[in-house]
Amino acid sequence: LEQLLEREFRERMSDFVGSKNLNRFVCLVQVPKEAFIGYFGIDIPKEDPMTGWIFLFVQENTKGKGLGKEILAHIVNVASSLGLKVLKCQVYQENKRVISLLRRFDFVKEKEWLEPETKMLYYTICKTLQS
């Protein structure tokens, strides 16, 4: 399962890395010489270089241990050091744990939208970074 998730991560990342329309900063989270834990990153579209779109994934067995909080704090710090003004994230509306985490970091819901193929409701959540 771990190898499958890591392979899925690498495939998803390679789809975006070749894009000429954004800059991507990615970090793989792994215990040294042990398990793949997750990944996170920031996409910065070239047409809007002051906005970063964040993503993060942690394995189910590591949830509830504060790792997401540490990762998000790191993402916010890195985004500030890159000079970004806004962070955004797209979240499935049923992902209450992530929505709660984002709210603790002062992210607010900007809009909601229905994904056309799955008919699932998503939120775009954003945070304005301080200069």
Image: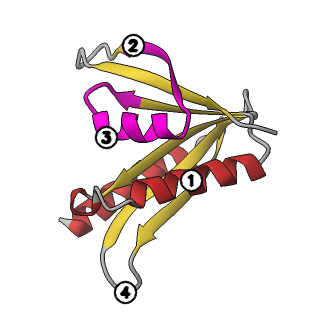
- Rate crowding at label 1 as few (under 14), some (14 to 19) or many (20 or more) other CA atoms within 10 Å: few
Q: Which residue is mark 4?
A: 33
Q: Residue farthest to the left?
A: 1
Q: Position of residue 104 (x, y in %)?
A: 48, 39
Q: Which residue is mark 1?
A: 73
Q: Earlier in the sequence, mark 1 or mark 3?
A: 1
- Secondary element at tag 4: loop
**Residue found at x 72% / y 28%:** 48
> Label 2, label 1: how many angstroms apart (C-alpha)?
27 Å
Mark in front: 2 vs 1: 1
> Label 3, label 4: how many angstroms apart (C-alpha)?
29 Å
> Label 1, label 3: how many angstroms apart (C-alpha)?
16 Å
Foreground: 61 or 29? 61
User: In the rendered image, is residue 18 in sight?
Assistant: no
Q: Position of residue 51 (x, y in %)?
A: 68, 33
- Rate crowding at label 2 as few (under 14), some (14 to 19) or many (20 or more) other CA atoms within 10 Å: some
The part of the chain drawn in magenta is 91-113
Mark 1: amino acid: Ala
**Residue found at x 49% / y 59%:** 70
Mark 2: amino acid: Trp
Q: Earlier in the sequence, mark 3 or mark 4?
A: 4
Q: Which residue is mark 2?
A: 113
> Label 1, label 4: how many angstroms apart (C-alpha)?
25 Å
* Quadrant of residue 118 within the rendered picture: top left
Q: Earlier in the sequence, mark 1 or mark 4?
A: 4
User: In the rendered image, is residue 91 in sight?
Assistant: yes
**Residue found at x 61% / y 31%:** 127
Q: Which residue is mark 3?
A: 97
- Rate crowding at label 3 as few (under 14), some (14 to 19) or many (20 or more) other CA atoms within 10 Å: few
Q: Position of residue 54 (x, y in %)?
A: 53, 41
> Label 3, label 2: how many angstroms apart (C-alpha)?
19 Å
Q: Is residue 108 within the magenta segment? A: yes
